Amino acid sequence: MAKRERVMRMSVEQPLWRALTAYRVLTMLYAIGLFVAAHEKLDRPWVAIGYYAVLAPWTLVTLPRVANAASCTRRFLVADLTIAIAGILLTPLADSHQRIVDGGPTLPSIWTAGAVLAYAIKGGWRWAAFASLLVGVANVVQRGAFSRDTLHNVLLVCIASIAIGYVVEVARASERTLARALEIEAATRERERLARDIHDSVLQVLAMVQRRGTAIGGEAAELGRLAGEQEVALRTLVAGGLVRTSYASEDASQGAVVRAVEVPDDEPDDTAPLDLRTLLAPHAGSKVTLSEPGAPVLLVPRAAGELAAAVSAALDNVHRHAGADARAWILVEDDPDEVIVTVRDDGPGIPEGRLAEAEGEGRLGVALSIRGRLRDIGGTAELISVPGQGTEVELKVPREQARDPRGKAGKAR
């Protein structure tokens, strides 16, 4: 069965880049609007016109640069901050000293904060502090003195940018942690899937060879002994883990990357429902009684297949542990909200604590082949056993939680 790797890129900071893009455009228009409203009061308005002739194209042309962390390079950040600082320092050439002292706006006005925020989102709070310091120095030089208004503006930009930079760093750390958790979960599911396949095929064959070889004797007994040794070794491998967990990328410019191995199902891509009765019919025989509704029991292909496989695993446990003469009954119930399949036998039952002991020995038939399968399709498996009175396995699959092979929620039609 061919495997493919699914790569998911996560970036909790992407909304911040989109917000910064809009902020730069709006504050550029705001700065130009302030100039248009007060251009008659400027001593040298042509200086402001020349600056805005650079600022406006620069803002619009570089919008792709602030679309994400990868595009926002250090060279761009330096150039962007240089334009902001240049506008601050050119303000005394365009405006009168009295207007500047009275608190008049600089040529870039609040557009400058966008340049500082780009540093914060790209590099965190340290980069933000560095850019804020340069802007603060430029404001002091532009005013020609250190005033209360200057201190207020500088502190406002500094605190806001440092806070945003710190939040970005925390978000990136949380993003990487979440990505690692998702990869561990994906690896665990893949390990359980492989373990189920091995249990339902290889391990059962090896166990059968061991039993038959021991019963026949002679050379067959030796083959049975070897098969038993391989069964133990393989169970140990299954219990220990079959998939190496990879870790999420920590490249902050790209966001966290989650890689998960996907194994495509054998079913076709369509989600035409299957009749569960046709999948369970082969189990009916002299020792197994199948009771089913008169109408089709429709489920999406993956849910039907996993549920039928869980029933097969339950019957295999009956044959192995209850003996060849044990009888089993399969009851299929098709309720509006869920499909329930009950497998009951008349064997000796399961002693208390035996399932936990079996899992410790690597015998994962109930844990993986039954409960694991139902969990993967959003269902549940409940096992009830009373020593001397047999065992009952109840499998429930809610229709709204059954999923098709591509993982989309689906309902039987």
Image: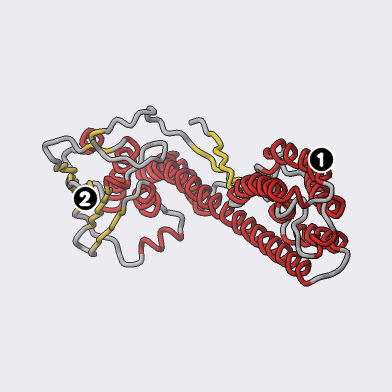
Q: Residues within 10 Å of mark 2 (few under 14, many from 20)?
A: many
Residue nearest the observer in this picture, 17 or 232: 17
- Label whose residue precedes the other's in the sequence (2 or 1): 1
Rendered image coloring scheme:
secondary structure
Please state which amino acid type lies under the numbered disc 1.
Gly
**Disc 1 element:** helix
According to the picture, the residue beneath numbered tag 1 turns out to be 50
Q: Residue at x 77, y 62 (%)?
A: 129
Numbered marks: total? 2
**Within the image, what quadrant is residue 127 found in?**
bottom right
Q: Residues within 10 Å of mark 1 (few under 14, many from 20)?
A: few
Residue 147 drawn at (x, y percent) = 81, 70
Residue 336 drawn at (x, y percent) = 18, 46
Q: Residue at x 61, y 58 (%)?
A: 171
Q: Residue at x 29, y 46 (%)?
A: 400
Residue nearest the observer in this picture, 5 or 318: 5
User: Does residue 237 show up?
Assistant: yes
Nearer the viewer's eye, disc 2 or disc 1?
Answer: 1
Relative side of 356 to 260, left or right: left
Disc 2 from disc 1: Cα separation: 82 Å
Please state which amino acid type lies under the numbered disc 2.
Thr
Residue 88 drawn at (x, y percent) = 81, 54
Relative side of 324 to 171, left or right: left
Residue 175 drawn at (x, y percent) = 60, 54
User: Does residue 119 show up?
Assistant: no
Disc number for residue 342:
2
Figure quadrant of the C terminus: top left
Residue nearest the observer in this picture, 331 or 238: 331
Query: In this view, which residue lies farthest toward the left?
Result: 294
Residue nearest the observer in this picture, 273 or 53: 53
